[in-house]
Image (tube, helix red, strand yellow):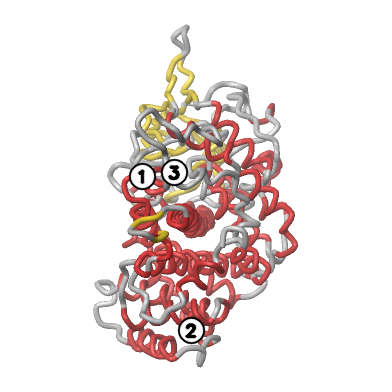
Amino acid sequence: MQPRRPAAQLPTHEVINMPPHIGDQNLWRDDPLLMAAVAREGAGWASADLNALGAAVGSEASFDKADQANRHGPKLNAYDRYGMRINQVDYHPAYHDLMALAIEHKVASFAWHHAGPGAQVGHAALTYMFNQVEGGVMCPMAMTYAAIPSLRSTPEIAEAWIPRLLSTSYDPRDIPVDEKTGATIGMFMTEKQGGSDVRSNSTHAVPLGTASGIGAPYLLTGHKYFCSAPMCDGFLTLAMTDSGISCFLVPRWTPDGQRNQLFIQRLKDKLGNRSNASSEIEMQDTWGLMVGNEGRGIRTIIDMVQGNRVYCAMASAGLMRQGLVQATHWTRNRRAFQRTLSDQPLMANVLADLALEAEAGMYLGLRVARAMDQADDDPHAAAFARIATAIAKYWNSKRAPGHVFEAMECHGGSGYIEESVLPRLYREAPINSIWEGCGNVLCLDVLRAMAREPLTVTALFDELELARGGHPALDRAIDRLRAALDDHHHLEARARRLTEQMAVVLQATLMVRHASAAAADAFCQARLEDGLMAFGGLPVGTDFEAIINRALPPQAA
């Protein structure tokens, strides 16, 4: 960890005009917009838990551990020293420390510990904060969280596994799950020939004995091309049976205490998310239990996919938030051309624009989370969640890389070097757009939802109409969107344009309803009327300082 007060007097010069170390952050208390949004969306009761995680993960020590875990990535040990196949991955101790921090603070399990209003909103806020520091740890957290609904489809599996997945004790030991104090779940569906087209699955499964169907043991054989977090205790995967694609839980250890036939072939050398191992895995007569009904594997695992998509939306919003924090700290503590950088009109425009995008992205993700909280009891909320999840995942993930890049540019060359947190945030940003459906897949899913479930369109426009009359640009944008959806020509070719329209109009609706007048007006004018996507193009007359100040804690403002 860097010293708090390094020497400023060097042999050739004195170090001046450099910002102080940003130090500890409380990612909850330092984010007034997050606190207000979480209360509004129904999880104000969770503030103590959120504050505890925000202080712990936002500490300088946690940022330093994230740096270490990414600099010293995981290593594959396929064999032990006696030549036995063990398929283990070794991680830097900092990674284990961050895993323990996440699990102890219920980052993977919060929503399931607190069934009822606000549970998913609280979980989304935890995701938003932790991703500002470290994304690699959040991969197994997201999958463990999202696996719970799928596992519940098979009671005997749920009874054995879910209590360990809900544990707040991190147990990294590679031993049978029934001997552990806590467990994590991964997933692998992708195959070389198919990618997102999981129906082209070539892995096959045959019953181990006379029993077949839900809950029965099978032997799986095949190849999975992307398998993240391979040291999880179990994995949800898809394989073909006589009745079609089915879902299976494949543990690292079989019930008789033997290592399962899961063969890690290699670890991927990835652009980002480097603290987390991603691998290729061969299965040969690999033991697994069928989850859900035979032939209904995609339906069984779809809830896991939806949960992970909300994760991607909130993770992207978190990256934007931390990019804003870093850029603002730098520009408020550095001078050029006889003025503080942040006081110069064009830089103030950029910072205010970054603040608007981070705020709108966070609002969008939390609104989807509230719909998920309500979905079991409200068909209208379920329909909104169905379409808005894909919209939020698509747009937040698309905006995050450019947002983090702009925050890096605010620093100049100092943002580009690895001592800064920004290169790690920048490398992390693209994965949220790629994982659980790339852009085209998400946009086609939006079209599919509208075609199969007309209530999704009704629910979306009901949400938009709540802000009718709040801003003339928004009223016009809602009308344009309705006209665009009523035009059924070339829908697939226009799917990205339509999804972007839905996302920005939905964000504008939330800004008009919940942001300050200055922020809402600037967002609507820039995004809905001017159509400028490069940051720093807010209209003349915008109160840049007011927008920036409301996004930051009083002591920083």
Q: Upstream in the sequence, badge 3 or badge 2?
A: 3
Q: Residue at x 72, y 58 (%)?
A: 46
Badge nearest the viewer, 3 or 1: 1
- Residue 385 pos. (x, y %): 53, 69
- Residue 398 pos. (x, y %): 36, 61
What secondary structure is found at the residue carrying circle 1? helix
Residue marked by disc 3: 421
What secondary structure is found at the residue carrying circle 3? loop
Q: Is residue 380 visible?
A: yes
Badge nearest the viewer, 1 or 2: 1
- Residue 136 pos. (x, y %): 48, 41
Q: How many numbered discs, if any? A: 3
**Distance between the alpha carbons at the discs numbered 3 and 1:** 10 Å
Kindly identify the amino acid type of the residue bearing the numbered disc 2.
Answer: Phe
Q: Is residue 302 visible?
A: no
Image quadrant holding the C terminus, namely: bottom right
Kindly identify the amino acid type of the residue bearing the numbered disc 1.
Answer: Ser
Kindly identify the amino acid type of the residue bearing the numbered disc 3.
Answer: Val
Q: Upstream in the sequence, badge 3 or badge 1?
A: 1
Residue marked by disc 1: 414
**Distance between the alpha carbons at the discs numbered 1 and 2:** 45 Å
Packing grade of label 2 (10 A; few <14, some 14-19, many >=20) is some
Cβ atoms under marks 3 and 2 closer than 8 Å = no
What secondary structure is found at the residue carrying circle 2? helix
Q: Residue at x 37, y 72 (%)?
A: 499
Is 524 drawn above or below residue 404 in the view shown? below
Residue marked by disc 2: 461
**Distance between the alpha carbons at the discs numbered 3 and 2:** 39 Å
| The quarter of the displayed image where residue 503 is located | bottom left
